[in-house]
Amino acid sequence: MSQDKPIDVLIADDEESMREFLEIVVGNEGYGVKTVSGGEEALEVLRTEKPRVFIQDLRMGGLDGMELLEKAKEIDPDLPVIVITAY
Amino acid sequence: MTSNQEGVLKESGKSRGPQCGPGSFLILYETGILALAAALTIGLAAGGDDRLARSTPFLLTVLGIWGLFDLLGTLFFARSGRRTSVRLIGDLTFCLCLVGWTGGVESFLIPILLACVALASSQLGLRRALFLSTGASLVLVFITVGRIKGWTVTELLGVDSEPSGFGWQTAVQLFGQVIALVAVALLGSRLGGGLRYAERINDLIVGAIAEGIVIVDRYGRIRHVNSIARGMLGFPGAADWRGRSVSDVLRRSEDGQLRTELENPRVGERRVEYRVDRDERVPLRLRTTVAESDMNGARTWIFLMRDLTLEHRVSRAEARLEHLEELEDLALGLAHEIRNPLASIRGGVQELASGRLDEAQSERLARVILRESDRLDRTVSQFMEYSRTKAQETTEPISLAACLEEVREVLVERIDARDIEISLEIEDGLDDSMEGSRDLIHKVFLNLGINAIEAGTRSLMYRMGAGRTSGIQVVVADEGQGMDEETRTRAFNPFFTTKTREGGLGLALVRKIVDGHRGTIEIESEKGTGTRMCVWFPSEAMSENTRPLESLGAQQ
């Protein structure tokens, strides 16, 4: 999703409805939101666009959620990460 | 089996003594010698030969009785070692007497003597055989010399004296015969020893094999049975069954199935249920092979028996465990599939109720909620379909080719398959008949096709041919995105999800149906190059022999 505002929150979830829901809710609070559906994509955005908060699902196809968390912390150790899961 | 063979079977079943092979040989040989003695006596008596009058009638009587005992010994004590040695010495003495009586070194019965020595040596060790042949040679020399010199001793034995010079011709003849005797003894002992060694090794192997072995000759007589086979059939301490007929050992009416298999053997593998007693039934796997004699083509049947009781129990327990694991996966998958949309719905409704959203966002969120509700409904429907599908509902003969053609027609009509080339290739002359449920098989290939279409393929090919060793194989090949190894191994799990597709039960259902038809399904795929789904079904003839199919469904 391209946004005019700078990206504050990055959302990574493989569930389309969850992505859309979070985008609406978080966007409604006035933050710039970007959503991605996979781990690799999320890391790319974390490196290039430096969001302020990262919301990620724990279970996704491809890159495992915990692995993604570790790699995200390598990129920016001070980045606040919110991990969500349906389990 | 012809009536003639049945007659032989019955008759040989009654006489439990002799075995085929050396036993029958011996009887032939004994009978031959006795017949010869009788013929000689009658011939000489008829010819009015004065030799008969001169030779002691006593000697003839002794020889006759000896021969008779010999024959009886062969018939009834063939397997007792001591009796065999006594009989051998008797035979040899008898033979030597005949030779002496008919002219010693010039006797036309010398070949009989050689045969007798060879036969005796074949049952003795090397040293005894040499001792025997030396003894026979000495007696031959004694008779020959006695004949020439006119000794009283030899005349008393019935040897006709022909006083003459001891010429070099006689010496050479005698020497040649002695050499022949020794050579024949050596050869006989060697061959007999080799045979006994092979038999011993054979016995050891048969005894050491962990499976039950029954060896049956062409007359339906048991040649060999190891203790394991006896134990399996409920005769742990039974006496030796060798020489007895199958119908004699398995004579209860409950033994019918096994008896039929042993009496009318067919090469191959079969399952037989044997009833040990009222309460115990043993499932047996019977493997039958045949050994054909080089000499006369006589067939010896070898039956390997394996008790499947334990294997059955283990496989039942394994199946139950596997079933529980599958159930667990299914329950977890279902929970996941419900919770995910539920989280969106709950959050969405909460947000809508808060009244903080503008109209456009509210509408968008409402659409999300609707979509997720539909998804929940789909999940439940799919789950019910999966659970309700019995592995096999009705069994009927199906033409797989017709089924595939129908699937192709359905797929071609789909909107999302408009640009996809869907083809069907069938091997020439293939017997495509199989036993199963038409609707379910249809579903298998439809689901595989839909899967390929959803994987973004440009072409879809159904290729049907004969299985590598048996049965029918259908390969469903696409050029879609393919699967990595993880996806490949988990593709058949219920609700398994890849990030691009909603987790579903399509492939899980496919596997359930294929399993229920005793088939197999394998995935050959590489990321980016497409997928080949290889489905194999046993052909109609094969499925007749398989056990009744059980439902593998979650409702158990």
Image (cartoon, coloured by chain):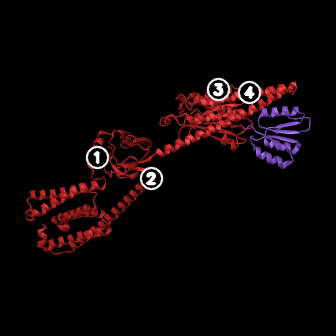
B209 vs B220, left or right, is right
Disc 2 residue crowd, few under 14, some 14–19, many 20+, Cα 10 Å: some
Give the residue number, with chain letter if any, for mark 3.
B409
What's the amino acid at mark 1?
Gly
Quadrant hosting residue A36 = top right
Q: Are marks 2 and 1 on the same chain?
A: yes
- Gap between marks 3 and 4 measured at Cα: 32 Å
**Sooner in the amino-acid sequence: mark 3 or mark 4:** 4
2 or 1: mark nearer the eye: 2
Local secondary structure at mark 2: loop
Give the residue number, with chain letter if any, for mark 2.
B210
Q: Mark 1, chain letter?
A: B
**Sooner in the amino-acid sequence: mark 3 or mark 2:** 2
Give the residue number, with chain letter if any, for mark 4.
B373
Q: Nearer the viewer, residue B213 or B49?
A: B213
What's the amino acid at mark 3?
Glu
Give the residue number, with chain letter if any, for mark 1.
B13
B402 vs B282, left or right, is right
